[in-house]
Amino acid sequence: MSNPVLSDDIIKALTSYTANMEAPVTFVLQTGEHAKREELVEFLSAIAAVSDKLLLDERDCDSALRSPVSFYLEVNGQSTGISFSGIPSGHDFNSLVLAILRSSGTALKLDDGIQAMVAAIQEPLHFEVFVSLSCHNCPDVVQALNQFALLNDNISAEMIDGGLYPELIEQRDIQGVPSVYLNGELFANGKVDTAKMIDKLQTLYPYLNQTTAEALPLQDVVIIGGGPAGISAAVYSARKGLKVTMVTETIGGQVKDTMGIENLISVSSTTGPKLTGDLLNHMNDYEVTLKEHLRVADIATGDVKVITLSSGEIIETKTVIIATGARWRELGVPGEKENIGNGVAYCPHCDGPFFKGKDVAVIGGGNSGIEAALDLAGIVKSVTVFEFLPELKADKILVDQAKLRDNITLHTNVASKEIIATSGKVSAIEYQDRETEQLHQQALDGVFVQIGLIPNSQFVKDVVELTPYGEVVIDEHGQTSEPGIFACGDVTTVPYKQIVISMGEGAKASLSAADYLLKLTA
């Protein structure tokens, strides 16, 4: 019989996932009255019904839980430190499932060096993660902090669905997700990943900079970056039988934030999160050592390259492939950085729901800008697109779609001058007509910046040759100015920053590295 709350496919998957649970897990739900409580009870009851190792217990937990729609996970009578305030459906359903499995004994998915670092934290840390159920970046943060809680009894982590706590959202002036609070103080907001949180913890607690991770043997190739280029390079290198390590802040890179992908040959339509999962699954078919949520702090050149990670770990390798991609370009105007998370955003999929029924602007008339405008048009009251050039640069099919939407206005040949805030929140944008030089001001509630990408190459500026724009200079084989160091994808001088091109460039860099290694042994 079908469950009215969970689909048959979900029940089947949950039954399979929970079959090998080592320890029973109890959902401890706060008693009381709330408009959404019955829905949450039905939701948790449906999940608990798939296994005799899942239980639901309603208790008066005093101040241990936030509200009657809050619950924590308990194992062997002890709280795991993981709690949810809200109904973790949507993108965060996976966060709940993984929390259950990991609480029960499933191995954690964090690098050994990071695990040692988190386990060493001596101070009590309570993380609150404000999320939107439509945010595809939020689950990564929730899942990382949940693992932190399981690693260290001093740490607790609470996912909070901002949609169920409007007063709290207003009280803390939250306009972007994920928004992470540590012990009641803002810790990180906007687009944040595990690597950035680790960096912040290392800054707060310098004693964490020492790692106890076991050193790897000499590697044939270390790939820096886990987007399409990096994963392509890893697969091709592993297929050559090489010892391969990948160091990356996050698997998927910039692609993970792209919702609609329709130009990847042989795949008529997909999404960034799905493609990211497919790429990872493909790489996992091969022997690749993955060092995720870590940065490269230094590269020492020579016949053997010595790579120092942000954790302090040292990796020695014969070759390096740089595949660090690019990041969102900032406007660089007054009011931008000051209002990130308070009306200025870079991910329409993550933060769009916070602007429901409001007026927003999108800066940029390329593909990413027009795609953002189309996505937002279904949520917000109105979208105004500001493009610096005289013509929109997006594909004609996207421009035509935008022109058909009554709530999208397109402005070309205008320069954004300032983002204006009132009482700590974005209230207007000042822009200039580039032909008449006349200044205008438009009232609005949010600004989404979509003006292109900047290469993530700062960490190699003293190692290989860069262009004035920060791109890594490569030849037709992907070779940089430094022997044995190759590069591929959006971080390089290769024109046309496309997923399919990055994949091909990753394969080419890998084959070039393999040829280099053959010459070393010849």
Image (tube, rainbow, N blue to C red):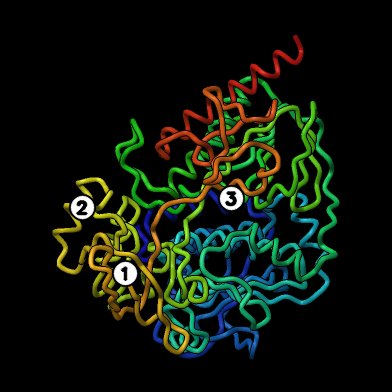
Q: Is residue 254 visible?
A: yes
**Mark 2, secondary structure of its residue:** helix
Image coordinates for residue 7, horizontal then vertical, percent: 37, 57
Residue nearest the observer in this picture, 74 or 264:
264
In the image, 80: left or right of 262? right
Which quarter of the image is occupied by the N terminus?
bottom left
**Mark 1, secondary structure of its residue:** strand
In the image, 473: left or right of 205? left
Quadrant in the rendering for residue 37: bottom left
Q: Given the current orientation, which residue lies at the most extreme front position?
A: 436
**Mark 3, secondary structure of its residue:** loop
Q: How many other residues sit within 10 Å of disc 1, few (<14), some (14-19) or many (≥20)?
A: many
In the image, 460: left or right of 250? right
Q: Which residue is mark 3?
A: 250
Q: Which residue is mark 1?
A: 361
Verify CB contact (< 8 Å) between mark 3 and mark 1: no
Distance from label 1 to label 2 (Cα)?
Answer: 16 Å
Verify CB contact (< 8 Å) between mark 3 and mark 2: no
Which quarter of the image is occupied by the C terminus?
top right
Distance from label 3 to label 2 (Cα)?
Answer: 32 Å
Image coordinates for residue 247, horizontal then vertical, percent: 67, 43
Q: Which residue is mark 2?
A: 399
Q: Is residue 52 visible?
A: no
Three-letter code, disc 3 = Thr
Residue drawn at x 34%, y 35% is: 267
Which of the two labelled residues, at mark 3 and mark 2, occupies the earlier sequence position? Answer: 3
Image coordinates for residue 127, horizontal then vertical, percent: 64, 74
Residue drawn at x 80%, y 56% is: 116
Which of the two labelled residues, at mark 3 and mark 1, occupies the earlier sequence position? Answer: 3
Residue nearest the observer in this picture, 467 or 477:
467
Would you place residue 366 above or below residue 145 in this image? above
Quadrant in the rendering for residue 233: top right
